[in-house]
Image (cartoon, grey):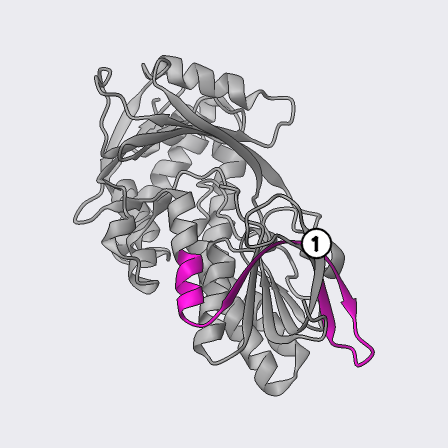
Amino acid sequence: MNPTETFDAVVIGGCPAGATAAQDLARQGHKVLLLDRAGRIKPCGGAIPPRLIRDFAIPDALLVARATSARMVSPTDNKVDIPIENGFVGMVHRDQFDEWLRERAANDGAERRVGTFDRISRDTDGTAIVHYQARPQSGKNESAPASVRARVIVGADGARSEVARQEVPGALRTKYVFAYHEIVRAPQNPPAGYDGSRCDVFYQGTLSPDFYGWVFPHGDTMSIGTGSADKGFSLRTAVGRLRQATGLAGTETLRREGAPIPMKPLPRRDNGRDVVLAGDAAGVVAPASGEGIYYAMAGGRLAAEAAHLYLRTGEASALKLARKRFMKAHGTVFWVLGVMQWFWYSNDRRRESFVKICEDKDVQQLTFESYMNKELARKKPMAHVRIFFKDMAHLLGLARV
């Protein structure tokens, strides 16, 4: 490895955010290195909304299932089924989906290398040097130190990003939900109530004291999981309870995965010099829902736009545009979801009321319009008024649960 090799951009992390940023920068004519440690699958429900499929040209072949409804389950087992009218939510396997995105970036000109990021130093002229442990092409376990020069760096190395820790002040002062799921084989003899085209979400304190549990279809497999910010709460035990309650305890377990997931966008995602963050490294996972794939890819695209402008102008202030544009587009949604999680997920009494509110057709329609299109629905203003008064009735204890 020639230590004087220079790339316009080095993207650290081959997640959806990093792969998207690498592809966009390569398509703009930049010399790009996509560095990914490979071999790790993030715990994720795998849901992608229609806007993601549309905006990022995702082929149908990657969709292993199409969810056409959602079921919300309250602490007292009240079930609210919400149809996805005139559409569906795509479900993907993250190992296949992420690798396809990395390959697409490579096909558009990004150079792929397998390695683990180590640190960033500076050359005598101030250019960043990215140091990493390179994995040989042979696939053997040994690694060797390597380094390349980079005019700009996109840190997309996940929650608790090492790039962020080293380069962006205050990056680690964020809140996390710890997610855990088990990938199981879909049952050949489905239990009563099972629907392979429905996403089930469980708002029950026994499954999570501050988040939710889920059962998501993935075609011939399923994701069964939960999450919590309470480090003393046993996620594995909760998933066992969920599998037992849904009649899925006996299904074959294919793998188990866990990881921290950030619940708040970082107040800053660049170092004011030559580094910009994207994806989980930037904290762009939606509160309340935990949805991250769309926001990761949208953030990766915005990071690429900011990096491209920086490479053209040399102005470090261009890197700030990644966060500014993201928050302009999605900041209000994140704030609303954050308040919703803080209030409605705090105890089972409120969770019960939350699920009850979701029986309302106006709530269902506006919720899915916002989810599918990734912006707050502004149609039907009277529906918003009705929802406001219904919410107030539940908040004040005037509504029956």
- Residue type at tag 1: Ala
Residue to which mark 1 is pinned: 144
Give the residue drawn at x 48%, y 81%.
29
Residue 88, image x, y percentages = 23, 46
Q: Does 30 sit above or below residue 381?
A: below
In the image, taking residue 60 as reference, residue 311 lies left or right, namely right
Residues 141 and 259: in front is: 141
Up the image or down, 344 lies above or below 138; here it is above
* Residue 313 or residue 329, whichever sits in front: 313
Q: Residue at x 24, y 35 (%)?
A: 82
- Quadrant in which residue 100 is drawn: bottom left
**Residue positioned 31% across, 34% down in the render:** 358
Q: Position of residue 56 (x, y in %)?
A: 35, 62
Which secondary structure lies at badge 1?
strand
Going by the image, does 83 lie left or right of 226? left
Other residues around mark 1 within 10 Å, as few (<14) / some (14–19) / many (≥20): few
Residue 187: % across, % down: 26, 21
Farthest right residue in view: 124
Left or right placement of residue 322 versus residue 162 in this view: left
332 shown above or below 396:
below
